[in-house]
Amino acid sequence: MLLIIFVKNSVLGKVKTRIANEIGDEKALELYNCLKEHTAEISSLDEVEKWVFYADFIEQHDFFCEAVFVKKQQADQEFGMRLQAAFDEGFAAGHDKIVLICSDCYELNSAHIREAFRMLDHKEAVLGPAFDGGYYLIGLRKMYSVLFDEKSWSTNSVLSDTIEDLNSLEISYDLLEPLSDIDLAADIPNDLRTKLNI
């Protein structure tokens, strides 16, 4: 079993840019680092191998401890192909169940990840729907490249388009509970607002 985590690099002005328009680049970077720290904490599962894929370069001595997480760099392609390349690498390494998450969902916890792996005992795929129309988690038992082709990423059609693909190919799947990604300032929960003094 493999857990893949996609993160962006913690670079001022390069993360949470839509939120930065409202709270500034420095606070947006602080927010993103809080999200990365949360993601590292919920991902420290003993029962699965864990790979962290960084967008532009591999960060050392960050929230993802090198003793726990294998660090890699995302493919230099558009987002869907980056996801596909990570799954391809995981399956090529011999993993039979792979779950992938990003670092934008503060509501995501370890129980959701474990439930996704349990769902893959009986289904070919699992999705974690986000309220914005995307998904915060995708899990597969084998590669279906169509799920990553011709998607309008970061739009409200990603989840519905992916489910349409699953249904059209008669791929069995299950859904986790819907959760909220933090994409806009209005999405920031109160405890993070207090922590960041926003």
Image (cartoon, rainbow, N blue to C red):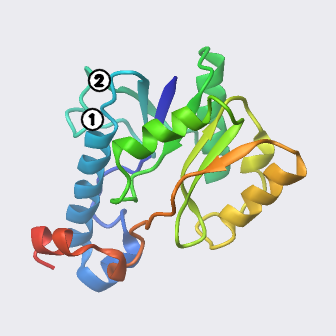
State whether residue 35 is above or below residue 160: above
In the picture as drawn, the residue positioned furthest to the top comes out as 94
Say whether residue 77 is visible. Answer: no
Q: Is residue 49 left or right of residue 140?
A: left
Task: Confirm or deny contact between disc 2 and disc 1 (CB under 8 A).
Answer: yes
Image point (59%, 19%), residue name: 95
Decide which of 195, 27 is in the foreground and name it: 195
Q: How many neighbours does mark 2 have within 10 angstroms: few (below 14), some (14-19), or many (20 or more)?
A: some
Q: Is residue 105 left or right of residue 191?
A: right
Secondary structure beneath disc 1?
loop
State whether residue 164 is above or below residue 166: below
Secondary structure beneath disc 2?
loop
Of the 4 image quadrants, the one containing the C terminus is: bottom left
Q: Amino acid at mark 2?
A: Val
User: Exactly how many numbered labels are in the figure?
Assistant: 2
Q: Position of residue 148 (x, y in %)?
A: 72, 49
Image-quadrant location for residue 84: top right
Q: Position of residue 19 (x, y in %)?
A: 35, 77
Q: Position of residue 121 (x, y in %)?
A: 62, 28
Question: Residue 68: which disc?
Answer: 2
Say whether residue 125 is visible. Answer: yes
Q: Is residue 102 left or right of residue 19?
A: right
Image point (69%, 36%), residue name: 123
Instruction: Using the numbered discs, state the Cα–Cα distance from disc 2 to disc 1 in whole angstroms.
Output: 7 Å
Q: Amino acid at mark 1?
A: Phe
Q: Disc 1 designates what residue?
A: 64
